[in-house]
Amino acid sequence: MKRRDFIKLSGLAAIPLISPRLVFATDGQNGSGQDILVCVFQRGAADGLNLVVPYGDNNYYQQRPNIAIAPPGQTGGAIDLDGFFGLNPNLSALKPVFDAGDLALIHACGSPDPSRSHFEAQDFMEFGTPGVNTTTDGWLNRYLAGAGQTATFQGVGMGHVPLSLQGLQPVVGMNSIAGYDLNTHENTQAALRQSMMDLYDQQQDIDVVTAGILSSVDELKAADPDSITPDNGAVYPSSPFGSDMQQVAQLIKAGLGLQAACVDTGGWDHHNQLETSLSPLSADFANTLAAFYQDLGSQMGQVNVVVMTEFGRRVRENASLGTDHGHGGVMFAMGGAVNGGQVHGQWPGLDDANLYNGDLAITTDYRTVLSELLIKRMGAKDLSIVFPDFSGPHDAGVFQQ
């Protein structure tokens, strides 16, 4: 293997002096007029039926006699959206965003691959090639490779670089903005930096990349996004998800050329006592997204948040008052360019005859939603590279041109 390829593929994991794990562009920043994509992944397979409640389908209550969310108007009932669907009451912070037309929901949505393995299903979704085990780079990295932007912080993964961002296109992974620096004591930092500059002062690939690492640290310090406070009275939850989304907002406001950010929120695998676990998690999820929306204000016209999960849950509750691994789920799309205030997608129904092996059937491929976003808002031209072997459709009616 050529050294250039090794460096790109390894993500510089062999350099222990840099914390956290990261890969960098080295040819400076080139601003872009394209929108910004924030991709949120609900790890663990969120129960879409109890998040966006199909209270108008009587089969929902027959299949879930103990754990179903009550209809609107009843104690603990869903928040009505359109006379058929309602929000879980713990998602109440998102109702004003929905009413403003900046939040859309896509039900019976997901990956067509039937896998019920968390790891396999997540991999397939993030590679953008459901059912294909030979893909080695993520759909978002492939998009960034063709986007024509060369900003150091073009693509950022909070906490880690997820598979969707991994590939030959340089991206950044950071645990936090404040911790994005040389992993050493402050009183030895200058000496360490000088030693690295002296060591890697040639024109070999490793020298160029190392110089880019050091300059990126300087670039972030100069922009000082960590000092940017929330606007418009926004208050983020003091949770990992809240912290990550606040830092994404800081990176956006700092004008570093961010084009795509990935954030994870975990803990959605609820086989037991679904509502006991789902209630605090869904409240944190909604409060964080609402704070992000409020914080960015008018900038949300150029920011698109999409939320996905690897698969939904089975329609019928289990004996532990939870739900097991299923198929169809729900996606969220938030932003000023969203055709919001509605639930998109064809509802297949929850009677046994219309289920997919006991699960909610998928009527909208998640790649349709992402394709539309990339075409209408992100300037994508050739989706055959981003989603190979996906012939469409490429329009779900979720995003505006």
Image (cartoon, rainbow, N blue to C red):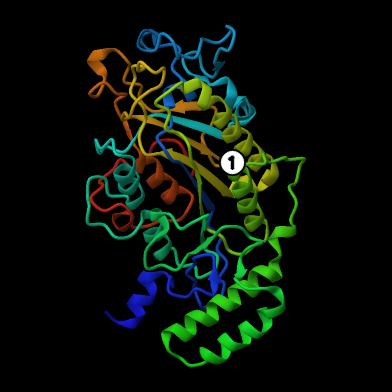
| Above or below for 92 versus 353 | below
Q: Residue furthest right?
A: 233
Instruction: Check disc 1 and give the amino acid type.
Output: Gly
Quadrant location of the N terminus in the rendered image: bottom left
Answer left or right for 90 relative to 266. Answer: right
Are there few (<14), some (14-19), or many (20+) residues within 10 Å of tag 1? Answer: many
Q: In the rendering, at what x and y percent does residue 314 appear?
A: 33, 23
On the image, which quarter does residue 237 sit in?
top right
How many discs mark residues in the rendered view? 1
Q: In the rendering, at what x and y percent does residue 315 appear?
A: 34, 19
Q: Residue at x 57, y 57 (%)?
A: 175
Q: Residue at x 59, y 45 (%)?
A: 240
Q: In the rendering, at what x and y percent does residue 117 appear?
A: 29, 39
Q: Residue at x 37, y 64 (%)?
A: 167
Question: SS at mark 1?
Answer: loop
User: To which residue does mark 1 refer?
Assistant: 336
The residue nearer to you, when weighing 274 against 83, is 274
